[in-house]
Amino acid sequence: MPRIEACTGGLMAHTSRLELPLLAASQAQKHVTHNEALLALDALTHLAVTDRRATPPAAPVEGSRHLVEAGASGAFAGQAGKIAVFEDNGWRFLTPRQGWLAWVAQDQAPLVHDGSGWTELKVRSSDRLGIGATADATNRLAVASPAALFTHAGSDSRVTINKAAAGNTASLLFQTGYSGRAEIGLAGSDNVSVKVSSDGATWRQPLTVKRDTGFVGIGTPDPGAPLTVDSSTNSLPAGNGSLLIQGDANKERLDIRSAGVAPGAGIQGFGARGTLASPQAPLSGDRLMALLGSGWDGTQFVIPLPAQIDMVADGDWSSSANGTAVIIRTTPPGQTVAARADRMKITGDGRVGVGTATPQALLDVAGTMRVGQYGKAALPSASGVGAGGLVYVSDEVGGGVLAFSDGVAWRRVTDRAIVS
């Protein structure tokens, strides 16, 4: 019902919501009351204020409106929270009510009055929101912006993407022209994966991190070790490795460090025929593992690699036969890798062949041999060398001669006489 208050000449009634003055039946100068009501409506309808301030502007404009802030002074003293309107070279103050909306031009932001003060107008709930873009039924939040910032409110800051089940997807998708190029997240499983595409249709998954073990897979979705690299899904040039360590610092090395009761640092290689999914036993001569070396020939790194240490199967393998041999291959100086050949072989039963691939003795040399040369005064201890040691004595009486150790003394091989 209308609010009644005393005024000159009698009582005046005001509306309950906007406090607009009402005309009395016997009121004189009704136009004054009517004009006051119109001015109030003009000030409050489509409420847009210049700014929020605690003191009046130095040169107010007729009809300008401001929200009076706490700590008001000057002409605004005691009017905190009200709407200040400059009319007829004076200030008029209107009391806002709960639910009123005001646009603040300086802030370019809407405010709402909650019954005790002005607060920012916030969207509490909506089924879609577009910021510089149009949201739709799928992209319920759409943002067109040069950048987006999520910052802390005092400590941490986190973005959460939740999915319904393990087989669903929770990921970040990167696009070019709305065509997918990369995806990071939980794509169709609970393992973290990185996927890439050149056309948005065919995708590769170069990186996977298993959720239960933390194992990292490169080229495989199911790593079986802390770091598993599978190059079978990629085409590599001949001679290129699946793992490349490079640099110009002269310290490009692979470090393997192990500690414990029985340190176990090592390099392991496993060879098989067939496939990884269905391996088969290697046959005699099949490579199990190799160490290879090459260099730059002025134009390119030489492939095939000119130096090799091959670990191969010595005989066909089975559950009861695991023979191995080691072959060293080198390339002669002044020649190309086409001249690379076997130089030494250690068979599975310990025979060493130099210049022969089929050693018939523990040491089988297909070529000349040379033993150490000593003067008599510099001969090592025969007992220290042990029986069977060979040397060449260059200054023996009668000329240089081969000598052998019998475990006590050095004897000439020609007549078994002790070297003197």
Image (spheres, rainbow, N blue to C red):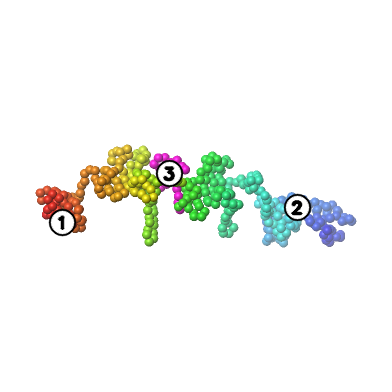
Q: Is residue 57 visible?
A: no
**How would you classify the magenta stretch by its main secondary structure?**
loop
Counting residues from the N terminus, which is met first, the one under dot 1 or under dot 2? 2
Circle nearer the viewer, 3 or 2: 3
In the drawing, does residue 78 fall left or right of residue 242?
right
In the drawing, does residue 370 fall left or right of residue 27?
left
**Circles 3 and 1 in contact, beta carbons < 8 Å:** no
The quarter of the image holding the N terminus is bottom right
Q: In x, y percent, where is residue 195?
A: 52, 45
Q: CA distance from mark 3 to mark 1?
A: 58 Å
Secondary element under disc 1, as helix, strand or loop, is loop
**Residue at mark 2:** 44
Residue sitting nearer the eye, 297 or 86: 297
Q: In x, y percent, where is residue 133?
A: 64, 44
Q: CA distance from mark 3 to mark 2?
A: 85 Å
Residue sitting nearer the eye, 17 or 166: 166
Which residue shows up at 65% across the image and 52% down it? 107
Which residue shows up at 15% across the image and 50% down it? 413
Which residue shows up at 34% across the image and 44% down it? 285
**Residue at mark 1:** 409
Q: Which residues are magenta?
A: 226-245
Q: Quadrant of residue 26?
A: bottom right
In the drawing, does residue 188 fall left or right of residue 250?
right
Q: Quadrant of residue 342?
A: top left
Near mark 3 (Cα within 10 A), the count class, few <14, some 14-19 or many ≥20, is few
